[in-house]
Image (cartoon, rainbow, N blue to C red):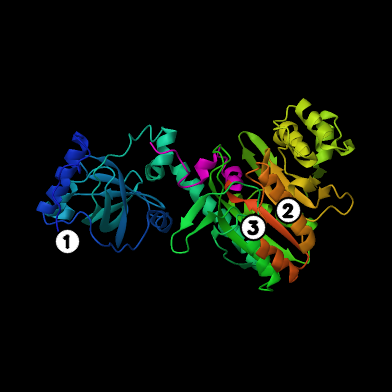
Amino acid sequence: MTAGCVVAEGPGMNDGDDPLRAVRVEKRDGLRALGVEPYPYSFERTCEAGELERRYAGLGAGAETEDRVRVAGRIRAMRNSGMFIDLHDASGKIQIFCHRDLLGPEGIGVVRLFDIGDLVGVEGLVRRTPRGELTVNAIRVTVLAKTLRPLPEKYHGLADVELRYRQRYLDLIMNPESRETLRRRSRVVAAMRRHLTERGYIEVETPMLHTIPGGASAKPFVTHHDALDIDLYLRIAPELHLKRLLVGGLADKVFEINRNFRNEGISPRHNPEFTMLELYEAYVDYEAMMRLTEELVTAVAESVLGSLRINYGGTVIDLSPPWPRRSMAELVLAATGVDFLGFADPEAARRAAAALGAALTGSENWGQALEAAFAARVEDTLIQPTHVTGFPRDISPLAKADRADPRLAERFETYIYGWEIANAFSELTDPQDQRVRFEAQMRARAAGDEEAQPLDEDYVTALEYGLPPCGGLGIGIDRLVMLLTDRPSIRDVIAFPTLRPR
């Protein structure tokens, strides 16, 4: 199609017999009949609405200026046949005054073809109305995008939650709280990045297509590369590649803010693709990662909210460090009276977990039974920030064994409001031990565990070249943003969540 050509409406382009759309299509064609292109290439602004409000905060009611500005935004309200227009941009709202004496008959003719929802540019003079409304007296108007569909009804907004997720653009237009949630998400990520780079971490990128899915216990998505004729897996975690960078000596501190993909169910706290911060630091253990977790979360809360006391779902959560540290077995014992550390065999642990209401398949090992009991009876009760330590070695194939009890690993997960927010290890650096752990995972995989990790020979080879002692940490950004924005669903904090097609 050549640039600048006009396309007539044809079959299939008018969305059926929608009379509201038909009126707008007629107005679009009316603009073109006036020689006005309803979809121009650009518009040079000099100010945003919020900036004007700050600049003219001291301008008195009824005062006029000779200050000429150029603003642009979306029409959200029109009064007196378009004489007064509320123009919204990303920073706020400005009132536009459109009068024949200033615009002339041609300009007024364009204004009469405006609809709520249209994107327009305005050049004019700043004044304050006698009622105190900051206003731009329009001397020239420019159509920037003629909308062909009406916005949802003003006073009820976009109430259909499913529609809000499917048509996020409408949600953002209509709901200021949705815009603020995603803007706050951006500030959370920026604060994390700033905190780490100021402490000597370097940001890196690792592959999203893996030949072997590893770094976490999860079922991957599978795709196929035609040129190489091989299956590839969407990344479930960047862990093994990040630790390869430590082996290579790229830096002693590395991090990645990454998208991960896991072929699992969808819930208010789970989306098949999600965002993690994952980092590794040489010459430290998981104790250092606990301190770093507290530093990161509190720094982000202070930066984004200005407070360490947050309100989530009507519950006040105090993020002030230090956070308590409790072992998984200790928490289960306190909640149920059952001491899993006293069980000598997996069968006894499974019976105890089942009696506590844990969901089991019957093939769980000792560590999996303890974890299932913890999930059933303890996890939801951890409202205030808590580091849960003493994870079973059985379910921690990439973590060093606990120095005091070889059944456990030097691993913790941080819980807030009953959710896992962070996961960290003293990283396993012994290549022989790592191979044995991978082989155990492979046996579990062969027995039907789709989330068990396969053997990554190249990663074991990398360890044989020497991985320094190190601590690793992952923080779920989506869940952290949920907490810091008081949003009930992960779909609220992801701009485009995964949905079943209609």
Q: Is residue 470 left or right of residue 161?
A: right
Q: Which circle, 2 or 1, is nearer the viewer? A: 2
Q: Is residue 293 left or right of residue 50?
A: right
Q: Secondary structure at mark 2?
A: helix
**Callout 3–callout 2 Cβ contact below 8 Å:** no
Q: Secondary structure at mark 1?
A: loop
Q: Type of residue at label 2?
A: Glu
Q: Type of residue at label 3?
A: Glu
Q: CA distance from mark 3 to mark 2?
A: 25 Å
Q: Is residue 289 above or below residue 482?
A: below
Q: Which mark is residue 4?
A: 1
Give the image quarter of residue 240.
Answer: bottom right
Q: Which image quarter is the C terminus in?
A: top left
Q: Nearer the viewer, residue 164 or 33?
A: 164
Q: CA distance from mark 3 to mark 1?
A: 48 Å
Q: Nearer the viewer, residue 473 or 106?
A: 473
Tag 3 residue: 278
| Nearest to N terminus: mark 3 or mark 2 | 3
Q: Which mark is residue 75?
A: none
Q: Is residue 489 magenta?
A: yes
Look at the image and give the residue range highlighted in magenta: 479-502
Tag 2 residue: 439
Q: Is residue 124 left or right of residue 493?
A: left
| Nearest to N terminus: mark 3 or mark 1 | 1
Q: Is residue 96 above or below residue 175?
A: below
